[in-house]
Amino acid sequence: MIQMRTIVMKRRAVVLLSAGMLALSACGGMAGGGEDGAGGGASDGGAAGGEAAPATDRTEVGALSPRIVLAHDGGVTTIDSSDGSTVGSTDVTGYARLNPAGDGRHVAVSASGTITMYDTGLLAQGHGDHFHYYVQDPALTDLSIPAPMPGHVVSHGDRTALFADGTGDITLIDPTALVDGDLGILEETSTEAPHHGVAVPLSDGGLIVTQGTEDERHTVQALDADGNVTAETDDCPGVHGEASAKPTESGDVISLGCENGSVVYRDGEFHKVAIDGDFQRSGNQKGHEDSSIVLADHKVEADPEGGAEHPTEIALIDTSDNTQQIVDLGSEYWFRSLDRGPHGEALVLTADGELNILDPETGEMLHEVPVTGEWSEPENWQEAGPMLAVADGTAFVVDPAAQKLTMVDVKSGEIYRELELPVVPHEIQVTTGTASGEYEISPGADEHEGHEQEGGEASDAGGHEDHHHEGGDHEGHDH
């Protein structure tokens, strides 16, 4: 049975969810506000602006249904989560990677030496005490930057950092500008040398950045808003992967993976996580803004047989005291297996075909949900394999061998929908129309007379469950 769910709003609005649909009655009227990025291929240069899609292309609807974006051989395809229908398909040259752009609507597509913004076509506009919802056809915009060997795309706070491994260039953008057809470039900087690195925006205007070369990397720096180094550690060999955790009163908390235990940036300093032995790699990490615990992979073989380790254990890193708990799931997983639920639940998709949902504080198993057939990690990380994404309180699990997607309610562990996929995907992102999945009415917004908001104040009446939705942190890929 499909459950109705209620999101408690930050101001006065209430959103009702049914089977992954963001439902809120909208009053009539014409569209207004920001314009949308137009379609077209990736440009060869860094576009600071772009054409906006004509307003006539936009259709007002009574609710937004999350859209599922799939990267596959030859392009990117978007489907509607309510029925699996294809709402758009775009050709992309080269192997395409997908990352959240940071606004809950656009997806950053990395391919052929560029990072280009893909508009999934969802728009929520606040009008006083209610929202209007609009949809339009998805499109690959002309908003792009040149990025030889495009790497990590990390959204944190109100900025998104785009990293080019081939040059060490870092581009910081304001993702809210994308709706107006502008890339919103705030700053362009670079590391000391090209390397497979990462940059994480900090809420105070600063930046966490790695330093290294193509041959080795072991340094992580914290920079202030003026680019000055305020903290540094050289004790992070093979630095890879990052996650944001619950901040402290003094600011952001960031965890980064190393080959001798992770490092945690907290209270303006770097702290080392203690490990057993000399080698422990957690190069793929997932955080949650309301949890001090970071979910990470747990590899302990410095020189694994066959060149790849297939772990069954995960690490739950407590960023508050620099410790970690190791949990053995009894089945292998890979870097596309990790994500977090709306309340910080730790999600791991294992090779026995189960979605494991754990309490991150205790490591206790909350749900074991059969979602795929048995599988093994592909020999090449670029190949399609089982994977998941979390949005709107739902885990979207892809089984490419069966060309099937299963939707699981994270809180209950219940499967409520299965969809046939039109393509065999190797990456997935899900957008809801807002960065957090929550809708906030801006103070002082114009009231529309003659329209009464349905639902009123949020309550727990009628057995509804409260869900707050995460924007998601970028996954550090280990390949």
Image: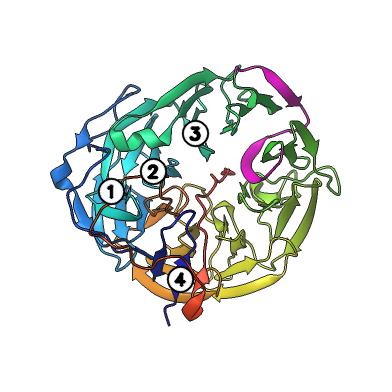
The quarter of the rendered structure image containing the C terminus is: top right
How many angstroms separate mark 4 from mark 3 (CA)? 30 Å
Which is more toward the observer, 262 or 449?
A: 449
The quarter of the rendered structure image containing the N terminus is: bottom left
On the image, which quarter does residue 118 sit in?
Answer: top left
Query: Is the Cβ of the residue at disc 1 closer than 8 Å to that at disc 3?
Result: no
The amino acid at mark 2 is Gly
Q: Earlier in the sequence, mark 4 or mark 2?
A: 4
How many angstroms separate mark 3 from mark 2 (CA)? 25 Å
Horizontally, residue 304 falls left or right of residue 411, namely right
Q: Residues within 10 Å of mark 1 (few under 14, many from 20)?
A: many
Please state the horizontal and vertical placement of residue 331, each as a whole percent of the image.
Answer: 65, 67
Q: Does residue 46 sit above or below 12 in this rendering? A: above
Residue at 66%, 53% in the rendered image: 291
Residue carrying label 2 = 444
In the structure shown, which secondary structural element does the residue marked by tag 4 occupy?
strand
Query: Is the Cβ of the residue at disc 4 closer than 8 Å to that at disc 2?
Result: no
Q: How many marks?
A: 4
Q: Earlier in the sequence, mark 1 or mark 4?
A: 4
Residue carrying label 1 = 121
Which is more toward the observer, 316 or 202?
A: 202
Please state the horizontal and vertical placement of residue 395, each as a whole percent of the image.
Answer: 49, 64
How many angstroms separate mark 1 from mark 3 (CA)? 21 Å
